[in-house]
Amino acid sequence: MFNKRIKIKELLQCEATGQKVIVMGWVRTFRNNQFIALNDGSTNHNIQIVVELGLLDDATLKRITTGAALKVVGKVIPSLGKGQKIEIKATTIEVLGDCDAEKYPLQPKKHSLEFLREIAHLRFRTNTFGAVFRVRHALAFAIHQFFNNKGFLYIHTPIITASDAEGAGETFRVTTLPLDGTAKRKDDGSIDFNEDFFGKSTNLTVSGQLEGELAATAFADIYTFGPTFRAENSNTARHLAEFWMIEPEMAFYDIEDNMNLAEEFIQYIIRYVIEHNREDIELLDARLAEEEKQKPQNERQEFGLLEKLQFVVENNFERITYTEAINILLNSPAYKKKKFKYDVQWGIDMQSEHERYLVEKHFKKPVIVRNYPAAIKAFYMRMNEGCEEGKETVAAMDILAPGIGEIVGGSQREERYDVLLNRMEKFNIPVEEMNWYLDTRRFGSVPHAGFGLGFERIVQFVTGMTNIRDVIPFARTPKNCEF
Ligand code: ATP
Ligand code: MN
C-alpha cells in the first residue's frame, strides 16, 4: 500500500511525541536548504519539515522547489519556530513530482486574482483559493444536512429540458442537428426539430422549479441542488452562464412559511461554516480587509467578513413589502440628489443599485422584499388578494444581501387552476405543452411555495470574494470557457 499518510489538518492537532508519520503534499517554500513548508490542501496551514544537514544529497536538495510534490517520512517533534506547535524531523524524503521553478507560474509571492483566474487550473494551490473551495464544500455539505435534518427529499431534476421555466429565453440550445446549413427545414423555412435528437427543440435547464413542484405534490418537502444554465450576456461580477442552484419546494407552505424557511436555511449554513471553517474564514477576512484598504474610505465596507457573518446569524432579516421598498427609495437622499442611474417608481424591476441601497445604506442587513408587482414576475407566482397602488401584486419574495444584491428569489405558487391558466395565457406560455404542470393543479392541488438560492452567490457572500468567477472552480462567462 502506497498511501498511509496522515492529513496535515489532522496532524496539526496531534501532540508531538516523536511518533513516526508519513505526509504527502506540495512544497510551498523551502528556506535555507533546511525548512520545507508543505501543504496538502486539507488546511491552509503548512507543516514544517526539517531537513537535517547531510540527510539529502545536493541533487535531491535542488529538486525541492516550490510546487514539487513530496512524500516525507519522519518523526513529529515540538517546534522551536514561531507560529507552529509541531514539526516533522524528516528521516526520508522522496520527490514524487518535480516542479521546474523557472516555469512554475505560482511563485511564493502575492498574485492578483485576475492573474490567478487565467491559471485557474493551478489556483487551487494558493491560500485564498484553498480557503474558498473548502468553504464552498462546507456550504454544500451544510445544505444537504439542513434539508436532510428536516426530512426534505433531494430530487434530481433534468438538465436537458424542453421547457423554459421563466418563459424568458436566454437558454442554451441542445441539438445534434448539423450546423452547416444542411438541417432539414419546414415549408416556412424554419428548422424542423422533428429531425432533432429528442424530436423537438430542447435546451439546458434554467431552473428545476417546475419539475420540483411535481415532486413536492407527492413528497411535500423536496429540494434540488444542481447546475443551471443561462445564456444571459451580462458580464457582471455576480452572473455566470453555468451556476449551481438550490431550489426547495414545499407543499402546505405559504409565503410566510417560505420566508421563515429561507431565513433559517441561510443562517444555518453560515453558522455551520463559522463553526467548521473558522481558519478559512479568518484567512478570507484578512484578505478582504487588505482589499478594502485599497479602496477610498467612503467605499469601504463597515464590517469585516467574520463580523458580517456573525451579525447575519444573530439578527433577523428585515422584512418589507415592495411598496415599502419603493417608498424608502423615493424618500432617500440618494434619490433626491439624483444619485440613481435608473428611475424609481412603483412598478419598476428594482436595479442592483436600488437593492444595494436598501441593504447597505438603509437597513445595513439582509432584507426580504415581498409582494412584487404581478407584471414583472413569473406566471406561476400566486396572485395576492386586493391591490397595492391600484395594481396587482404576487406573493413573491426576494432576499437581498449586502455586497451581492439578490441571493434568493422565491414565491408562493399559484395553486388555483383557473387563475394559473389565466396567467399563463397572459404570459403567452404554450398551455398545451404544459399539461403535465397543470395536472398538479387539476389533481389534488395544494398551497405550496419555494425559492431558488444561487449557490455561487451565497459562496460569494460567505467568502467575501468580490467576483463570482472566483468562487466556482472553472467559470463559464460570455466569451470564456477555458479548462
Ligand atoms: P438577477 O436579477 O440577479 O439576474 P434573477 O432574478 O435572474 O437574478 P432568479 O431567476 O430568481 O434570478 O434565480 C434564482 C437565484 O439564482 C437568484 O436569486 C440568484 O441567486 C441566482 N442567479 C440567477 N442568475 C444567476 C447567474 N447568472 N449566475 C449566478 N447566479 C444566478
Ligand atoms: Mn437574471
Image: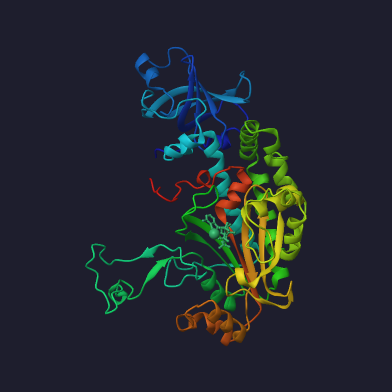
Q: Is residue 338 left or right of residue 194?
A: right
**Quarter the C terminus occupies:** top left
Q: Is residue 22 left or right of residue 256?
A: left
**Quarter the N terminus occupies:** top left
Q: Is residue 276 visible?
A: yes
Q: Position of residue 161 (x, y in %)?
A: 43, 70
Query: Residue drawn 70% across and 36% down?
Result: 298
Residue extending furthest toward the left: 182
In the image, 83 versus 402, the foreground residue is: 402
Q: Is residue 110 above or below residue 178?
A: above
Q: Position of residue 311 (x, y in %)?
A: 75, 47
Q: Is residue 18 left or right of residue 354?
A: left
Query: Residue drawn 37% across and 19% down?
Result: 60
Q: Quadrant of ligand 1?
A: bottom right
Q: Position of residue 329 (x, y in %)?
A: 73, 56
Q: Is residue 279 above or below residue 149?
A: above
Q: Is residue 73 above or below residue 260?
A: above
In the image, 32 versus 187, the foreground residue is: 187
The image quarter in which residue 104 lies: top left
